[in-house]
């Protein structure tokens, strides 16, 4: 084989778009079942079990499509509803009615009726591409920002405008980013980090590093509060366990969820008095 010196421009000029066929066997089966799915004004539990009885995995995928959930979102919500119960085919076969009723509690029947009776518009395909592409990223951002906004309302209620938000605070030896520094980022007595998750991913592990950095940077007598929520923590218990260990060791003062909002406000008021803010 002749030895030659290739040129970058030659390689670049030879590049072409890589196109792939997205329809695998599962997609083809699901599309076929959707095309033959009976259109009704209203659906019942029997319609759901019929889908799952024919092919459980395909049926779950179809039901997830009706709900508009990603796989991670669907699994997280269903695990939250079923608590410690399995969400697999064996659990369905053991008690199909109970399993299906848990699915119905997600608003499934209404979603099925809406989609089956939707009047098509030429833009539907483009809207769906927008939702599954950019919309997926926006949803993730909104989940996180929603928790932050919720915490902000309570922080404002207690401290008024005496706090810095989404800032880098200064500690004795180093700096760290946080969502709230009270009363200021230059000399915080209370630091708050808030995160919300609707799907599992690397960012759930990233928060461990963020918290560790805050713990290293803050004064030992500065309170660190962590506000979070989202059923996906049930799938990432190892990460959540690490955060709880931080709290048990004194690195984090208290961990809160939406359900603990009243306690969050009460603790902020107590810290305000103790720190004379």
Image (spheres, rainbow, N blue to C red):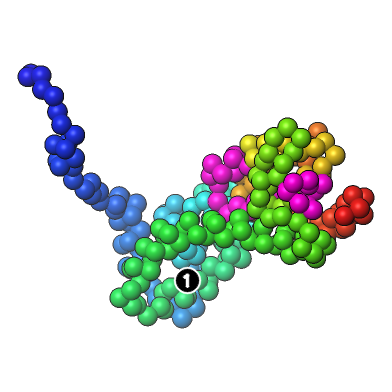
Q: Quadrant of the C terminus?
A: bottom right
In screen coordinates, is 187 left or right of 212? right
Q: Is residue 231 visible?
A: no
Residue 90 position (above or below residue 96): above
Depth order, front residue of 145/24: 145
Name the residue: 59% across, 39% down: 205
Depth order, front residue of 187/214: 187
Q: Residue 56's x, y, as percent? A: 46, 53
Name the residue: 19% across, 34% down: 8
Depth order, front residue of 126/189: 189
In screen coordinates, is 161 left or right of 41? right
Name the residue: 47% across, 58% down: 136
Q: Residue 21's x, y, as percent? A: 25, 51
In screen coordinates, is 2 left or right of 70? left
Q: Residue 234's x, y, as percent? A: 65, 46
State the extent of the magenta-drawn residues as a range: 182-208
Mark 1: few/some/many CA within 10 Å (<14, 14-19, 20+): many
Q: Quadrant of residue 177?
A: top right
In screen coordinates, is 169 left or right of 269? left
- Label 1: element kind: helix
Q: Residue 188's x, y, as percent? A: 78, 47
Residue 66 position (above or below residue 173): below
Q: Is residue 149 visible?
A: yes
Q: Is residue 9 magenta?
A: no
Residue 270 position (above or below residue 8): below
Residue farthest toward the front in the current orientation of the protein: 186
Q: Is residue 197 magenta?
A: yes
Name the residue: 71% across, 55% down: 164
Disc 1: which residue: 112
């Amino acid at each position: 084989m002749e030895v030659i010196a290739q040129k970058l421009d030659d390689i670049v000029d030879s590049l072409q778009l890589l196109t792939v066929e997205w329809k695998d066997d599962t997609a083809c089966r699901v599309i076929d079942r959707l095309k033959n799915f009976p259109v009704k004004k209203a659906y019942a539990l029997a319609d759901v079990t019929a889908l799952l009885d024919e092919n459980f995995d395909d049926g779950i995928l179809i039901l997830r499509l009706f709900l508009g959930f990603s796989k991670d979102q669907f699994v997280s919500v269903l695990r939250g509803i079923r608590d410690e119960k399995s969400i697999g085919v064996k659990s369905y076969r053991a008690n199909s009615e109970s399993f299906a009723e848990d699915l119905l509690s997600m608003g499934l029947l209404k979603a099925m009726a809406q989609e089956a009776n939707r009047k098509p518009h030429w833009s539907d395909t483009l809207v769906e591409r927008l939702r599954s592409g950019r919309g997926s990223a926006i949803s993730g951002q909104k989940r996180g920002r929603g928790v932050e906004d919720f915490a902000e309302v309570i922080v404002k209620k207690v401290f008024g405008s005496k706090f810095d938000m989404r800032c880098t605070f200064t500690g004795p030896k180093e700096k760290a980013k946080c969502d709230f520094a009270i009363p200021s980022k230059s000399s915080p007595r209370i630091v708050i980090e808030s995160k919300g998750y609707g799907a599992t991913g690397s960012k759930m592990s990233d928060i461990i590093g963020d918290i560790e950095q805050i713990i290293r940077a803050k004064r030992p007598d500065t309170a660190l509060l962590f506000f979070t929520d989202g059923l996906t923590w049930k799938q990432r218990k190892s990460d959540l366990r690490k955060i709880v260990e931080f709290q048990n060791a004194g690195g984090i003062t208290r961990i809160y969820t939406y359900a603990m909002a009243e306690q969050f406000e009460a603790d902020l008021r107590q810290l305000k008095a103790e720190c004379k803010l």
